[in-house]
Amino acid sequence: MIWSKEETLERKNIEEIQLSRLKNTVNRIYDKVPYYKAKMDKISIKPDDITSLEDLKKLPFTVKDDLRANYPFGLFTVPKKEIVRVHASSGTTGKPTVVGYTKKDINTWSELIARIVSMAGVDCTDVAQIAFGYGLFTGAFGLHYGLEKAGAMVVPTSSGNTEKQIMLMKDFGTTVLVSTPSYALHIMEVAKKMGIDPINGLDVRLGLFGGEGSTEAMREQIQKGFGILATENYGMSELIGPGVAGECECLCGLHINEDHFIPEIIDPNTGEVLPPGEKGELVITTISKEALPLIRYRTKDITRLIYDKCKCGRTLVRMAKIEGRTDDMLIIRGVNVFPSQIEEVLLNTKEIGPHYEIIVSKNGYLDCMEINVELEDTRLLDSYANLDNLQNKIKHNLKTVLGIDAKINLVEPYTLKRFEGKAKRVIDNRK
Ligand code: DLL
């Protein structure tokens, strides 16, 4: 279902909205945030210099360090009394990145989520179980209010407590699972252990997955294992949380809510804006947020934009599945490797399951990569020759894709760590 008319506007009309909102946003940050004013004054840009969308390029980028430098509320454009909610990103070191919302921001957020969940096929007959952690993370609360707005019955189980999660799923007739893709895999596996067939024993028909990257091969595993349509949605705490973009039922890229976010793709090394369709770092300018508007925020996520009209009728530009993050890229013996490339090869090998771990270390001066991956079927362990063949096959396929060697360790099922939130599959011991 198409939730709002803005999803199908002609490009010219979308751009009119974008320009008018961009001008308001630039005026707002210049007037209300001394840090932004100083940044713009330094390069002699005034809000009046922004007269077209092309002028966006003249504005400076914002990066995570800008938020850190202004911790906790320094980039807010409203006094604290107008903030009704804060969330924070789960920074592993130091202080988190804090984001704030006015009442209007919270309404906008619910509206955008209602849009993306409707895009994926949710309606008022659905029972949506939210298996993201409730708390400072934006995932659970963001999806919660938007799903309610779309009319679904929300079951706020939060993440973890997987057996109980599955029991409620069965008893309440959950039709929509909201989680990270890796937690969905784990839920699937635990259901099987409990003697519940994820396909016939549960009513789940749709997944709303996000918060972390995953490959098409992973999507296929989840779709097959659960018997569901696995859609993906994208967002980031700094930008609003989930709600920036989402997939419709055509599964051909994530529609960006362009009347609220202007996307650009840049070369991450030079900062130059790349021509339409080229792959690079996604940069987003928020144009409707009150409390914490961000200009040209560098997401570090790598994707490309797709401008052709989607079969669903929406005209909103789509972003391709995120390929990785500029800070996730491993450089191994001089070769750039994205964990998603490894995942694609592993998950396309039928004898192994979707659970793996990448370990990078140094042997003297030389980088070494080792991959632990679980076998799907323990029977392979009985034959040394079969194991050896499989190891060599994976090694060969990885070498073809990456151009480098990796040591493959095939391990027994259920031996690697499982994740209830965002998965951490890379251990880089070189750091
Ligand atoms: O993960 C917001 C979110 C929650 C989005 C739930 C969707 C669903 P952060 O914790 O700030 O916010 O992490 C943002 O997560 O820059 C991406 O690298 C990654 N990410 C989020 N969604 C996707 C996705 C939330 N669909 C960071 N595909 C982003 C790939 C994703 N990566």
Image (cartoon, rainbow, N blue to C red):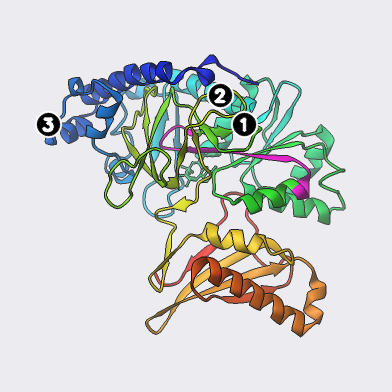
Compared with 60, 80 (above or below) is: above
Q: Which mark is residue 314?
A: 2
First reached walking from the N terminus: tag 1 or tag 3? 3
Q: Amino acid at mark 2?
A: Arg
Alpha carbon separation for disc pair 3 and 2 = 39 Å
- Cβ atoms under marks 2 and 1 closer than 8 Å: yes
In the image, taking residue 255 as reference, residue 412 lies left or right, namely: right
First reached walking from the N terminus: tag 2 or tag 1? 1
Compared with 381, 185 (above or below) is: above
Q: Which residue is mark 3?
A: 44
In the image, taking residue 376 as reference, residue 238 lies left or right, namely: left
SS of the residue at dot 3? loop
Would you say residue 144 sits in the magenta stretch?
no
> Residue 228's quadrant in the figure?
top right
In the image, taking residue 349 as reference, residue 114 lies left or right, namely: left
- Circle 2: is it few (<14), some (14-19), or many (20+) Cα within 10 Å? some
In the image, taking residue 139 as reference, residue 29 lies left or right, namely: left
**Residue ID at (62%, 31%):** 248
- Circle 3: is it few (<14), some (14-19), or many (20+) Cα within 10 Å? few
**Residue ID at (24%, 37%):** 60
Q: Amino acid at mark 1?
A: Cys
Q: Quadrant of the N terminus?
A: top right
Nearer the observer: mark 2 or 1; the answer is 2
SS of the residue at dot 2? loop
**Residue ID at (70%, 75%):** 390
Nearer the observer: mark 1 or 3; the answer is 1
Q: Which mark is residue 108?
A: none
First reached walking from the N terminus: tag 3 or tag 2? 3
